[in-house]
Image (cartoon, rainbow, N blue to C red):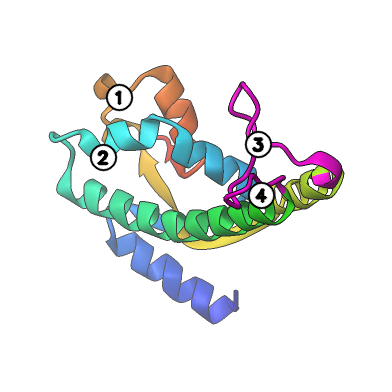
Amino acid sequence: MSEKKAKEQRKAQKTARYKVESLTIKANALRALFMSQGMSRLMDITDIDPALKLRLLMATKKLDEVYQDVEKVRQGIIEEHSEKDKNGNPVKDENNIIQFGTSRKTAMDKLDVLLNEEMEIEGGKLVLKMGDLPQKHLSTRDLFDLSLMMEVIED
């Protein structure tokens, strides 16, 4: 980021009550964030400051766009390398685990590369004060899950 752009961004953030920054996150952590309950619980809270809710929705939307892309690539790897039944669907064992047969190592290597890919998502991180977060509605686990997309600063 250029110095001029960074300066403009800092100036804009000073006027906003809730700051939004870029987020660097690995694909596996992004998947964990979307699979957690914390994000959906946070979105369901009704007595939350409207400005905070707006920033959360904006950050979540940016994260979701990248998450959908990661999932599309992940599903493509599974589709490409899984064993298929007579209808062309991936074969699953009795525990509902997709079978890869001789392509297992190749598939796992590709999935490992994908899920360890580090991405920078502009506007995906919310910076807020501890007192702004509606903690009475969230469990410790929810707060931990959400810490991936938030930076909480001193009041």
Magenta range:
82-103
For residue 52, above or below residue 142: below
Instruction: For the residues labelled 1 and 3, say whether their Cβ atoms are less than 8 Å apart.
Output: no
| Residue 120 % position (x, y) | 59, 60
User: How far apart are the two marked residues, 1 and 2, measured between alpha carbons?
Assistant: 13 Å
- Check disc 4 and report the residue beneath it: 78
Instruction: For the residues labelled 3 and 4, say whether their Cβ atoms are less than 8 Å apart.
Output: yes
Q: Nearer the viewer, mark 2 or mark 3?
A: 3
Q: Residues within 10 Å of mark 3 (few under 14, many from 20)?
A: some
| Residue 40 % position (x, y) | 32, 36
Instruction: For the residues labelled 4 and 1, say whether their Cβ atoms are less than 8 Å apart.
Output: no
* Viewport quadrant of the C terminus: top left
Q: Residues within 10 Å of mark 2 (few under 14, many from 20)?
A: few
For residue 39, above or below residue 87: above
Among the two numbered marks 3 and 4 on one chain, the one whose residue lies closer to the N terminus: 4
- Check disc 3 and report the residue beneath it: 98
Q: Which amino acid does label 3 sit on?
A: Ile
Q: What residue type is labelled 1?
A: Gln
Q: Which of marks 4 and 2 is in front?
A: 4
In the current view of this chain or complex, which residue is farthest to the left? 47
Among the two numbered marks 2 and 3 on one chain, the one whose residue lies closer to the N terminus: 2
